[in-house]
Each structure stands twice: as structure tokens, then as C-alpha cells.
Image (cartoon, helix red, strand yellow):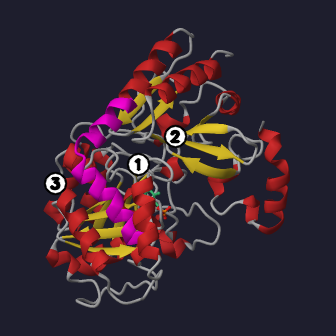
Amino acid sequence: MLTQNSSFFDAAKKVLVGGVNSPVRSFSSVEGDPVFVKKGNGSRFIGENGQSYIDYVLSWGPLIFGHAHPEILSFIQSTIADGTSFGAPTVLETRLANLVIEFFPSIEKIRFVNSGTEAAMSAIRLARGYTGKPYIVKFEGCYHGHVSSLLVSAGSGALTHGQPDSLGVLKEEVSHTLLAEYNNGEQVEDLFRRYGDKIAGIIVEPVAGNMGVVLPKDGFLETLRSLTTRYGACLIFDEVMTGFRAGIQGAQHVYGIKPDITILGKVIGGGLPCGAYGASKEIMACVSPEGGVYQAGTLSGNPVTMAAGIATLEKLKNETHIFESIEEKTKLLLNGLRKVIEKTNLPFKTHSVGTMFSLFFTDRAIENLSDVKKAQSIDFKKFYRRVLEKGVYLAPSPFESGFMSAAHSVADIEQTIDAIYYGVSDF
Ligand SMILES: *Cc1c(COP(=O)(O)O)cnc(C)c1O
């Protein structure tokens, strides 16, 4: 099955780096060739190999209504018929801004950009511009896009200046990034004791989703909130993944913590390229043209992306039971998985919040990146291929979250449970 895509992959590799436009798509962590997608519909897509797959990647989170949802497509189509971009204001931007603000009361004003990366980059610039301070605290295992100064995670240990994770990132670029372990409030307190008057902000995934789903421990987010308040730094929640996923109003509502700056992406773009950052009027007044923090974008807030976002968020707003039903389906899947995996002797854990989930093969608690790294007691490649063979498309890496959509049916979930049971039954 994995080899049926070889000719497509070979042709792609001749002209695209690694055959892909984003590294994890290359299947490098599971080996074999990636599935080339022909078309999607609802919970499934069909590969160029003709096989149908139940999709739990959903373009890495955005497709909360599944693939090719007719209402979302139709609004995109009617909008695109009048032009794709003007570089001048349209009323659609105000409409999407109002929708986001209704869901996120911590946001009074918002700026749309084209990706989560761009939003994170702009948000830390804003925190520095607003506070006039240089340092940013980030956590090991949290991902905020490929922003140079945030491409630092493990390896250098907490409480030290970070070392770059990527070639081409200068030491100078990460010299104002302070690293701490996720869920370790004491390390953050220590950083504030040492650098407190120089810290512009803390950037954090309020529920970590880019090392699998790792939940914040009781008191962790509270500690971040109280330290930033005490030292006059910004608390930046990167809710690119958790916004409209951990809860319909994001992790900030689920955990009852109000950040100063929120970063969004993924679901708010309805499947088209989009990111956003928002905050109080006072903080956002620092952004150009109102203030001195420069940030711009040729295609930012283009009508096609806005239409996709509006159609998605209006559906979530008007059909209030939908989000709950996606959460219920996430629970149904995990309950089913627990029942079948318990039949094997494999140690495992399921983590979930809202409509995102993870399966770890360990019996130890998972609270941070080093726990996650130790959590693979099975051969993930073999597990992954067996599940894929049964027509279930999970993220091709053990360190990624899974996502549920409104389009997934109970029958899909039952097929998935069977496929995963098949996946684990040979260890
Ligand atoms: C996906 C993601 C990003 C990056 O978004 P892109 O649109 O891929 O640039 C940033 N932060 C978090 C938490 C994400 O999950």
C-alpha cells in the first residue's frame, strides 16, 4: 500500500525538497511513501492509490467540519467569483473579527495574517514593543511555527539561554529566548527572579498539542498568569491549535485564564491560510498604523480566507450543539480505544481535551517533553503502517495530536477502533 504512491513521490522529490512543502508530510518518521491525496469529502479522503482513508489529521486541525463541507465551499465560491484579493479593506474582515471576538472575550482588537507562524512572530514583537523589554520565555516541546527566535526546545536544558534547533538560526536570534520545562512553574519563577525586569512575555500553548496532547497541571497556567501580572510582562497564549479545538472558546475559557495576547490560526481560516493575533485595545494600539510595532501583509485578510473563516465560525456559533457532539465523538473514540488496547498487555495512556486527542504507549505520567520522548514503548512505524493499511490516517509521527470533525460518524469511529486494535495486536 505504501509503495503504490512511489511514482508520485519520486516525481515530487525531483522538484520539491523531500517531495513535500512541510517536513512531517514526508512520512520521514514512519518511513515508506506518503499517501498522495486525490480528494476529500467529510471525514475521509481518497488517495491517488484509490484507497479511502478516515482522516484524523484534518490538515493538522483546521477542518473541524471535515473535507469539502458544502456550505463552507459555497461561501468560498461565491466570494471568489468577485475576485481573490484587493489589498484594500472589505467588510468580510470586520465580520470575521467580530465573530472571533465573540468567542474570545480577552480579544478586543485583532489583526489577521496568513499563518500561525506569522501570528506568533508578530505577537512576540508586539509584546516586546508594548513592554519595551527584550526576553521571551518559551517551553520545551511547545511549537509556535518556524519563527527563528522560537526554534529552541530541548537539548540545552531549562534555565539557560536557548541553543538554536535549526541550522541557519543565529545564536544572537535566540539569545533573548529563555527556556523552561512545560508544567514546571518553579523554573518559570526562577527565570523571573533572575530576569524579571527584562521579560517581555511568556509564550505558551495553554494545552500543549505539538508533542501530542499534554495537559497543563493544576496551577501551572495560574502561575504564568500571576508572574506576568506581577512583573508587567505579557502572557501570550498560542491557541493556533487549541482555539476552537480545546473548547469552542479555546483553552483560555476551559481553564479560566485570561491571557494578554492570543494567537490564533488553523480553524479560524476554515481550511485556507490564516493566522491572527489579538489583545486588548490598549495593547493592540501599539501595532501599526496606530502604533510603532510594524507588521503588514499583502494578502492578509483576503476575502477568500475571510469567507472560509466566516462560514466555519458562523456554523459553530449558530449550531451550538455541534462542538459538543464533536467532543462526544472524541470521547467515544478514546473509550473504545481504551477497551480494545486493554486486551493487549501494552502500557498506554489516552490524553484529550475538547476535540483533540493523543495515544501514548507508556504507563508513566506525561507532563513535559522528556516524558513524551520516553513514552514510545512500541515500534511506532509498524503500528502506523498497520493502522494505515486498514484505511485510518493518523498523523505520521508519534509526537502529534489527532483531531475529530463534525463529519466523523459512529461507523467511522468503530472502524477506527478496529484498525487501531489491529495496529497494536502484533506486539
Ligand atoms: C500549527 C501551529 C503553529 C504554526 O502555524 P502555521 O500556520 O503552520 O504557521 C503555531 N503554533 C501552534 C500552537 C500550532 O499548532
Secondary structure at badge 3 equals helix
Query: Residue 396 versus residue 257: which sits nearer the camera?
Result: 396
Secondary structure at badge 1 equals loop
Labels 2 and 3 touching (C-beta < 8 A)? no
Q: Residue 285 is drawn in which quadrant?
A: bottom left
Query: Residue 251 versus residue 124: which sits nearer the camera?
Result: 251
Where does residue 4 sit, x and y in percent of width and height? 82, 42
Residue under label 2: 56
- First in sequence: mark 1 or mark 3? 1
Whole-Å distance between the Cαs marked 2 and 3?
Answer: 36 Å
Q: Amino acid at mark 1?
A: Ile
Q: Say which mark, if any, is on residue 226.
A: 3
Residue at x-position 77% and y-position 39%? 2
Secondary structure at badge 2 equals loop
Tell whether 40 sits left or right of 390: left
Magenta region, main secondary structure? helix
Q: Amino acid at mark 3?
A: Ser
Specify whether tag 1 is near ligand 1 (CB below 8 Å). no
Q: Where are the magenta residues, as a range?
A: 305-330
Is residue 311 part of the magenta span, yes or no?
Answer: yes
- First in sequence: mark 2 or mark 3? 2
